[in-house]
Amino acid sequence: MEKMKADIVEFFKLPLEEKKAFAQLPNNLEGYGQAFVVSDDQKLDWADMMYLITRPLQSRNIDLWPSQPLTFRDSLSCYSMKLKSVAGTLLEVMAKNLGVAPEEFSTIFQDQPQGVRINYYPPCPRADEVLGLSPHTDGSGLTLLLQVNDVEGLQIRKGGNWFPVKPLPGALVANIGDIIEILSNGIYKSVEHRAIINATEERLSISTFHGPREYSMVGPLAEIVKGCKPKYVSMSYEEFMKTYFSAKLEGRSLMENLKL
Ligand SMILES: O=C(O)CCC(=O)C(=O)O
Ligand SMILES: [Fe+2]
């Protein structure tokens, strides 16, 4: 964890030209750049980010993984493996809590697809006029978030109010994503969150998203809706992601639209 954090800090310190060697290609989210750009005249969030697919292994695009600092690729591989195991354990516990056979979850999350987004939020003297990341829920099953330095910025929304999540050294924040909300028919709720900006200090975080395998169907699990009605539409994961990335980040509005 410490090595990953140090390498990330180093990478974002590199001159822009060097970071650009790993820039997103057109119409692709992977690489160094910006997230959630849906139109030319949109006000952008105050952040740079780097998104990399880490699992399944054959989906890795190593050319987009920074080669500077020299240990970056090894650190990320190792971090990815450790987080896969934490996510696997949590998903097992959640399946148990929901009373569904563990195979139901392990089939959907087979090979544990995983993507890592590294968020870099520069300081802004007019911090109260910008947001680092607009309110949203994650389109993943389960997100494990590591706050890289001790600058506060993550907030979660509950009952209409925003609450700060203080960085704890060595701790991961586990955020339920939309996919688990849908599979569990709303028993687990995906958490609405945002990142705010600090006026004088930069902030860094790494979100590790765990989602279903390619071509899986995402809908309330049959075992859960046995005695009740499904509350969400079912669709393929591809279709869900298309909808997710074409919508503006607007809190829980996407999830509300998917409700039956
Ligand atoms: O920077 C943070 O704490 C939040 C990041 C986040 O929500 C995301 O990457 O989806
Ligand atoms: Fe998020």
Image (cartoon, grey):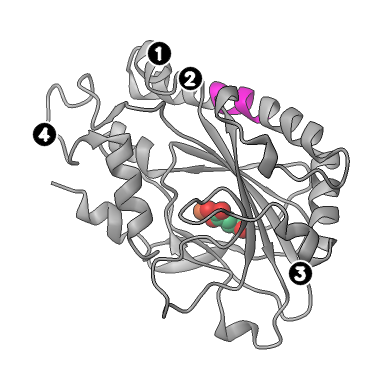
Q: In this view, does 37 lie above or below 107?
A: below
Q: Earlier in the sequence, mark 3 or mark 2?
A: 2
What label does residue 102 carry, if any? 1
Q: Determine whether the residue tagged by mark 3 lies in a helix, strand or loop.
A: loop
Above or below — where is 128 with respect to 97? below
Choose the circle earlier in sequence order: 4 or 1: 1
In the depicted view, which residue is nearer to us: 64 or 231? 64
**Would you name the residue on which mark 3 appears?**
202
- Write down the region rendered in magenta: 83-88
Could you classify mark 1 by the number of other residues whose Cα lies within 10 Å: few (under 14), some (14-19), or many (20 or more)?
Answer: some
Indicate left or right for 260 with 84 as reference.
Answer: left
Q: Which residue is at 45% across, 18% downward?
A: 110
Amino acid at pointer 4: Lys
Q: Which mark is residue 92?
A: 2
Q: Earlier in the sequence, mark 1 or mark 3?
A: 1
Distance of label 4 from label 1 (alpha carbons)? 22 Å
Residue 161 figure quarter: bottom left
Give whichever of 49, 230 is nearer the camera: 49
Q: Distance between the residues labelled 1 and 2?
A: 6 Å
Query: Do callouts 4 and 3 mark residues in contact (Cβ within 8 Å)?
Result: no
Magenta includes 84?
A: yes
Identify the amino acid type marked 3. Glu
Residue 172, image x and y in percent? 66, 41
Measuring from the top left, give residue 125's x and y in whole percent. 71, 87
At label 1, the amino acid type is: Pro
- Label 4 residue SS: loop
Pointer 4: what residue?
Answer: 229
